[in-house]
Image (cartoon, rainbow, N blue to C red):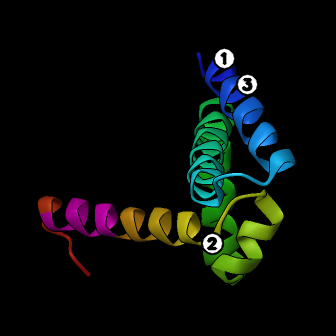
Amino acid sequence: MWNRAMDKLCREYTALKQTGNDPDRQRILENRIEGIDTSMVFAKNGPAFVAAMVYAYFRRGLSSVEIAAELGCKPPLVRRTIHKLNRLWKQTQTASGTQQ
């Protein structure tokens, strides 16, 4: 599914890049390609990918920029993931009555 979409977007992006036409469309394609690539990484290595983020952030004390460089993703993805996990942790602690 994603491979076909990625191939199509990459072909269009390459053609636009070679001709130098439509820089706005090129930026749109770059963003879509990055999004699909991130989805593919999560689909392939989801739990391991998230575990690596958590370990690097909480145990190693790395920043989102450092973690992203190690894992091959963007820093905002790391920050969003850590934020969502923190929020989920707080919700589970509140629900179980053991909020700290």
Q: Secondary structure at mark 3?
A: helix
In the image, residue 44 sits, relative to residue 86, either above or below, namely: above
Q: Nearer the viewer, residue 66 or 6?
A: 6
Q: Which residue type does callout 2 highlight?
A: Pro
Q: Secondary structure at mark 1?
A: helix
| 2 or 3: mark nearer the eye | 3
Q: Quadrant of residue 60?
A: bottom right
- Mark 1 / mark 2, whichever is N-terminal: 1
Label at residue 7: 3
**Residue, disc 2:** 75
Q: What are the residue bounds of the magenta stretch?
A: 87-94
Farthest-out residue, right: 18
Residue 47 at x, y percent in the picture: 59, 41
Q: Residue at x 76, y 30 (%)?
A: 11
Tell whether position 45 is magenta: no
Q: Quadrant of residue 4?
A: top right
Q: Which residue type does callout 3 highlight?
A: Asp
Q: Predominant secondary structure in magenta?
A: helix
Q: Locate residue 17 relative to residue 5 in the image: left or right.
A: right
Q: Residue at x 63, y 45 (%)?
A: 38
| Separation of residues labelled 2 and 3 (CA atoms) | 25 Å
| 1 or 2: mark nearer the eye | 1
**Residue, disc 1:** 4
Residue 58 at x, y percent in the picture: 61, 76
Q: Nearer the viewer, residue 96 or 85?
A: 85
- Mark 2 / mark 3, whichever is N-terminal: 3
Q: Residue at x 15, y 68 (%)?
A: 94
| Separation of residues labelled 1 and 2 (CA atoms) | 27 Å
Asked whether the residues under the numbered discs 1 and 3 touch, taking CB atoms below 8 Å apart as contact, a structural biologist would say yes
Q: Secondary structure at mark 2?
A: helix
Q: Locate residue 21 relative to residue 86 in the image: left or right.
A: right
